[in-house]
Amino acid sequence: YASPKWWKEAIIYQVYPSSFQSHPGNTTGWGSVKGITSRLDYLKELGVDVLWTSPIYKSPQADMGYDIADYEDIDPCYGTLADVDDLIRELKRRDMRLVMDLVVNHTSNQHAWFLESKSSKTNPKRDWYIWKAPKSINPDGSPEPPNNWAQILGEANSAWNYDQVTGEYYLGLFTPDQPDLNWENPEVREAVWDVMHFWLKRGVSGFRMDVINLISKVPSYPDAPLILGPGHKYQPGQQFFVNGPKLHDYLTEMNRQVLSKYDALALGEMPFIYDEDEILKAVGARSGELNMIFIFGLVDIDNPNVRMALKPWTVREMKAIITRWQRTMIEKDGWNTVFIENHDQPRSVSRYADDSDEWRDKGAKLLALMQTTLGGTLFVYQGEEIGMRNARSGEWPPEAFRDVETINYWKKVQTLYANDPDMLSLGRKVMDMKARDHARTPMQWSAAPNAGFCDPEVTPWMRVMSDYKTVNVESQMQQQSGEDSDGELTTWQFWQRCLKNRAEHKEVFVYGDFHDQSPADPNVYAYIRTSSVDSGDRWLVVLNFSGQKQRFVLPEALELESWALGNYVSEKTPRKPLGRAVDLQEWEGLIGKVR
Ligand code: TEU
């Protein structure tokens, strides 16, 4: 609380532009910038301060805009630069801000820089990307890639792509459509700084920097160890490009050349790294690099070595991960991000709670209570506020998936396990549980055709989830507590209430101290948040992460003053007693003040 900042206190809402909101008369089936602008009052009412939009730049959309062909223009499917200026103006009018995605580990293979780079070995931009000669030539004349690294979004394939014209390979860590930029080259860094100035001068308030910890590669490009099983020629090379040797030099330079000149948010996405010292180098208060990063601990909880696979996990592990980063950032003067959803992850209610019709609402509210009472900057992903869930198991045929990662995954499974029905059905299960598309379906605004996402006669680019008639913004905002209901808030109304509570007690929930009260309990997560100012306000949070009733007993030193919020509390349900023993219903969550 000693160093308050807008980006610490802000509620940041992630908009996935293709699926957020289209506008009347738009026949593309895609969301648009105009559509986003039309929903600002809605977001304000929810309690949002800042929008982060996933990429809207010109792009062939090989990876939904994370393949950028022009950093200084908007893709026609989303609108125009003038639409963005309008969005920024309308945000400012409401005292809100825009944060844009900055994808500069790689560009699209259609970016002018890459087209030049690949045109000849002597082109001035040749060295803007990472080109290497084949490791060897096979007896049949075919070349072998420089090393065995696998693509991140298609681990059956090499991360190196052969170019017939110049006889060399270029690196594309994610897909062949996303060639990696060569950050060793100072001209590349200059070009990136220019892009950042361009948007900051236009009124953008900062960036979410896509895979920013992948920009420095180990220059010898060694082979990766064998991690993936039989049938996998290529292997994850993460240890050779995650937080590589020059990362901190580049981030320091970025800060000096660009960020230090604006009041801008520098938010780094940093997958594949869990090392405390490495992370603190980037987000320590005095690091001079980034303000905050997305740490992947929690969202990787069910990932073995690659994301498209399953690993069992326990609530106790989940609690330990959250507690670890809450404590670390407090003790070591860093800064947390609080998030459990984004466009790369399945829906949180399906993953961390129970998305059955019976428990979905309680589960979504439980997650709202948890997130709005954790320290750091809070992120809400579109649809999370109404408890949107994954497609039901088996509901989507394999062809329904649109994401390149899932398409590549299903291809691999079919190739490797064509005659193994068990492995094929396991593959389907992985898609049902992990596919990124679960989070990319159109926002459910109302019970109107296409869920109010686009005009009725237009076909949306991605299928609308089948439950939109019952689960949508309009009905959840309108429902009155009164005679005919039991007075319970809807998921949306509960989120709004929780966000308000956080905003009213920032010194506790955003900045305060954090102490786990139940590290050994296999189901209940209970913690104390203590105000960072002299008042010493203390709040208790008790969350039952199970579908069974549980009892939590308050530690001796604590005495409850009052319960403030709970996902079972309603006008007709009497308040919980204030005794030492807290009896919890299935998926029940409560917060209260401690004396
Ligand atoms: O994601 C980076 C990333 O590593 C993951 O979250 C990724 O989705 C996962 O590892 C795949 O298994 C970012 C973007 O958020 C993602 O949408 C892009 O596809 C990726 O970078 C490439 O730009």
Image: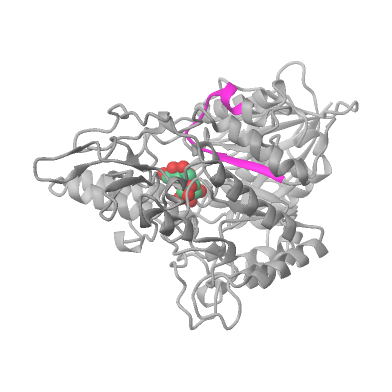
Q: Quadrant of the N terminus?
A: top right
- Location of residue 121 with respect to 45 vertically, above or below: above
- Location of residue 499 with respect to 231 vertically, above or below: below
Q: Residue placed farthest to the left in the image?
A: 139
The answer to which quarter of the image holds residue 448 is bottom right
Q: Position of residue 344 (x, y in %)?
A: 48, 49
Residue 371 appears left or right of 346? right
Span highlighted in magenta in the image: 265-279
Q: Residue at x 64, y 45 (%)?
A: 368
Q: Residue at x 54, y 66 (%)?
A: 470
- Location of residue 402 with respect to 304 vertically, above or below: below
Q: Quadrant of the C terminus?
A: top right
The answer to whether any part of residue 494 appears in the image is no
In this view, the residue in front, 562 or 409, is 409
In this view, the residue in front, 312 or 545, is 312
In this view, the residue in front, 141 or 214, is 141
Q: Position of residue 200 (x, y in %)?
A: 71, 54
In this view, the residue in front, 469 or 554, is 469
